[in-house]
Image (cartoon, rainbow, N blue to C red):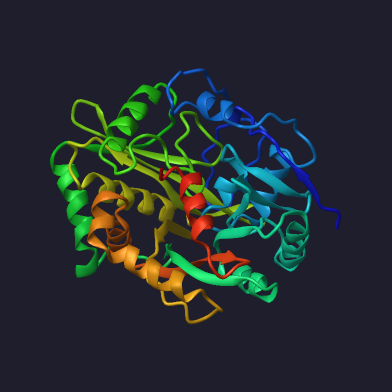
Amino acid sequence: MTIQNNLTTVPTTFSVVVPTAGESIGPSTSISIAAKERGGRNSPTYWANQQSSGTETTLGFEHRWQLLQQHGNFSIAYSTAVQPHLEYFGDEHGYIAYRRRKGWTFALGDPVCPADGRRDLIAAFLKKYRRPSFVQVSRDTARDLESLGYWINEMGIDTELRLSEYSFAGKEKEWLRYADNWINKRGYRIAEGSLIAQEAEVAEISEQWRGTRQIKRKEVRFLNRPIVMADEPGVRRFFLYDADNRMEAFVFFDPLFSQGQISGYVTCIKRRRPETSQYAEPAIMKRAIETFQKENVGSVWLGLSPLADIENREFRANRWLHWTSRYYHSAGWINKYYYNFLGHTQYKKRFRGQEQQTFFASPVRFNELRLLTLASLCGAF
């Protein structure tokens, strides 16, 4: 197939639809909302203005959206299609999302394409760009890359909750039931809704929450999709309100797709006011999971637990990176002052889902400068 390289911008008009399980959604609009200028760093205008200028081509948003609906069945697939700053390599048959920084190229996630075209698309990408790295890819993509000479290191687990068999019964899920009961007894309510007329509260909570993080200066990006203060196609939003109808917390979910239909959701944004109870997030998660179960949604993914359960027994791996990753995940000073790896891992393990390892693939054995550049690209410093 003919592969071409395109840099495109994400349009600032989205359709807002709340689909039922198995229902496909498209970029045509049932309710159309133009993203408004809101000034703050979290606004869609801010993020859009940071992108390189470009024009819509054959790999514009609608083409990416069509490919996403057919092949976007991994946690960060939605992010690869809509996240600002990204560039795209491919054509109407599939694409690879990537970014460049300081001479390095980093591909984000799996190629969004048919499985039988994945290796050819990767090979074409390697001819275009000199020795790119691939970040947070699946086992199948890692296997293709190893066959092309890459070193493959594990980079952390993603957790799937298979909803047809998932239950809140038993002692291991008691913490979720307790959180739900605690919220209900104190007059809180949880509701799914739109951002319309709630943008100011969401932005306020987001800023307060970010003030409690180790990385306060700006939104983490690339591996995380920055929050967007506008309704987006397919994204589901659940809010927690107190007895006075004041918003206290929220959890947003990106859709996953398979063969034109929504197959699941992945948690993408979770935030609460610093003074709000720690039971807020698990209570929202429980209510959202129950909602998706009623809709016969296939699964909920919890997203990446960085550096968790690193073993590196399957592929040719860099042993230095192996031991460094294991040390960073457990080092107290790193978890306290830089990034709470252990907290992320322990929280997601409590859901007792099925864990799948993700991978970092590099064409070279030693990656110190690449990894520092990747950390910068993600906004770590």
Quadrant where the C terminus sits is top left
Residue 170 in sight: no
Q: Position of residue 345 (x, y in %)?
A: 32, 62
Quadrant where the N terminus sits is bottom right
Q: Position of residue 301 (x, y in %)?
A: 44, 58
Q: What residue lies at 56% left-to-right and 38% top-to-bottom?
A: 233
- Given residues 66 and 19, the one toward you in this image is 66
Residue 192 in sight: yes
Quarter location, residue 308: bottom left
Left/right of residue 236 with respect to residue 242 in the rendered view: right
Left/right of residue 69 with respect to residue 285 in the rendered view: right
Q: Position of residue 196 (x, y in %)?
A: 44, 24
Image: 23 above or below 311: above
Q: What residue lies at 57% left-to-right and 37% top-to-bottom?
A: 84
- Given residues 63 and 19, the one toward you in this image is 63
Q: Residue furthest right?
A: 2
Q: Residue furthest bottom?
A: 313
Image: 79 above or below 203: below
Q: Position of residue 263 (x, y in %)?
A: 55, 56
- Given residues 315 and 355, the one toward you in this image is 315
Image: 66 above or below 347: above
